[in-house]
Each structure stands twice: as structure tokens, then as C-alpha cells.
Amino acid sequence: MLLLLKLVVAPGLVAAVTVAVRRWGPAVGGWLSGMPVVAGPVLVFLAVEQGTAFAARASHATLAGLIGTVAYATAYALTSVRLPWVASLLIGYLAFGATTWALYHVQPTIMLSLVGLFAATVVGRRLLPRVEHPVGPTVAPRGDLPLRLLATATLVVVLTAAAGRLGPLLSGLLNAFPVLTTVITAFTHAQRGSAATVVFVHGFLGAITGFGLFCFALALTVDRLGLGAGLACALAAQLAVSGLTLRASRATT
């Protein structure tokens, strides 16, 4: 039963985000992709299988790992202006890998992780090139969606299965691996060009702070209050911040 949930919950959320990207464009898609649609279910499964104390430490590590996700997205967007998608993808992965390696050895506190994530998003958004013309929605090829769902299901199953051996630190850091972001940035870049990719990343960086607060709240509450109450607190924090960022983005457009 739990395996079935792993194969359905996170991929189902990814499918919903994919439909939103195709209907409303990369800006909305970036905002939705900044939500814990993949990492959130993984943390819930870790709490069920490994215990709430394990999930609390993994949530802390995932929060720190999101700094690496920001590094990936920023590096991809910056290099997409001049390079093809394959080169941008490799550079983005190098940025993620280097950042994650540093975080593994530094092991910042939960407050430093949160502050670091906020600082990384501010710097990342300032570095992004400006897009003069808005980019509207388009129709993506059918092969796009199965690839996203397969990548998501693979990460969820493999990471939760290996969590006992990896431990909460590595499990959490790897949980921040940009699976959904990888597929969307690469497909958007290949199909629609750099401008649409930058629009997507801009929305993504605006929303990932809510993702960070989700991990922050879950890390502080899941072991003390239990999975249900901890998850409710985390979702409330994430939705509140995401609502504020969405309102702010609409006010500036």
C-alpha cells in the first residue's frame, strides 16, 4: 500500500504542475514548482518508515539542500542565454553538486540554513537577466509528461528505500535534488528558448522560500507534535508565504 502511494502521490502532484505550466505559462509554472510537490511526500514517507525524529533531521537537511537547488536554477538560467540546454544542464548540476558537497561538510544550523536560502534566492533573482517580452503558454510534446512522472517516482522510491543506509543528513540533502526543476528547465529551454526559461526560474526562486519554510516548520514540529500536526503546521507556513509571494508578483506586473 505504501509503495502504491509512493508511485501515485508525488507523480500526481507533478502532473498537476505540468498541466498548469502548459495552460498558464512558465511564470505560474515556476511558482508552482517552488512548492514541495516532490520533497514533501518524501519527507512524509520518511516519517512513516523511519520515524519522526529521522524526518525532523531530514527536513532540516532538505532545507539546507534547497540552497543547492537555487544554485542549480540560477546557474541554468544564466547560462541558457548563450548555451544549449545540455550545457546549461551540466553546469547547473555542477553548481548543485558543489553547493551540496559544501553543505554536507559544513552542516549549518537550521536558522543558518533558512537565512542562507533566503539570501541565495535574493542573490539569484538579482543575477537573472531581464526578459523584455512576456512569454505565453504553449503546447508541449506528449513525451514530456511521462519523463517527469518516471523521474519523480524513481526518486521517491529509491530515496526512501535507501534512507536507512544514507541517514537523515544525506537523505535530506539528496531530497532537494531538482528533479522537477531539471525537466521543466531543460524542456522549456529546448522548446521555447532562454527567455521562457528565465521567466520560469524567476517564478521558481520567488516561491522556493515557502518551500524552505515548509521544511523549517516540519523540522521543528514533526517529532514534537507528531506527523499530522507537524505536516499541518508546515503546510500552513508554506501556503502563507506562497500566497504573499504570489500577491507581490502580481502587484509588480
Image (spheres, helix red, strand yellow):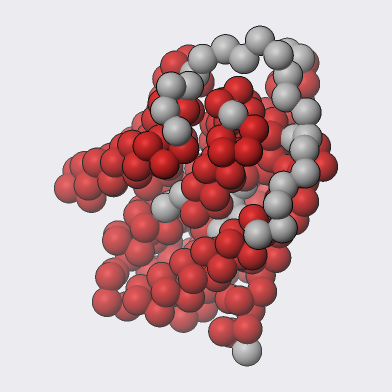
Q: Is there any visible trace of residue 16 in the rendered image?
A: yes
| Image location (x, y in percent) of residue 16 | 75, 56
Q: Residue at x 64, y 55 (%)?
A: 144
Q: How many marks?
A: 0
Residue 198's place in the image compared with 239, above or below, is above
Residue 230's place in the image compared with 85, above or below, is below
| Image location (x, y in percent) of residue 137 | 78, 35
The N terminus - image quarter: bottom right
| Image location (x, y in percent) of residue 33 | 62, 45
Q: Is there any visible trace of residue 30 in the rendered image?
A: no
Task: Pick the residue in front: 122 or 124.
Answer: 124
Q: Residue at x 59, y 59 (%)?
A: 148
Instruction: Place residue 225 in its image quadrant.
Output: bottom right
Task: Pick the residue in front: 35 or 140.
Answer: 140
Residue 219's place in the image compared with 166, above or below, is above
Q: Residue at x 73, y 19 (%)?
A: 134
Instruction: Place residue 59 in its image quadrant.
Output: bottom left
Q: Residue furthest left?
A: 105
| Image location (x, y in percent) of residue 125 | 50, 21
Task: Pick the residue in front: 81 or 210.
Answer: 81
Q: Residue at x 64, y 65 (%)?
A: 146
Q: Residue furthest bottom?
A: 1
198 vs 71, left or right, is right
Instruction: Place residue 205 in its image quadrant.
Output: top right
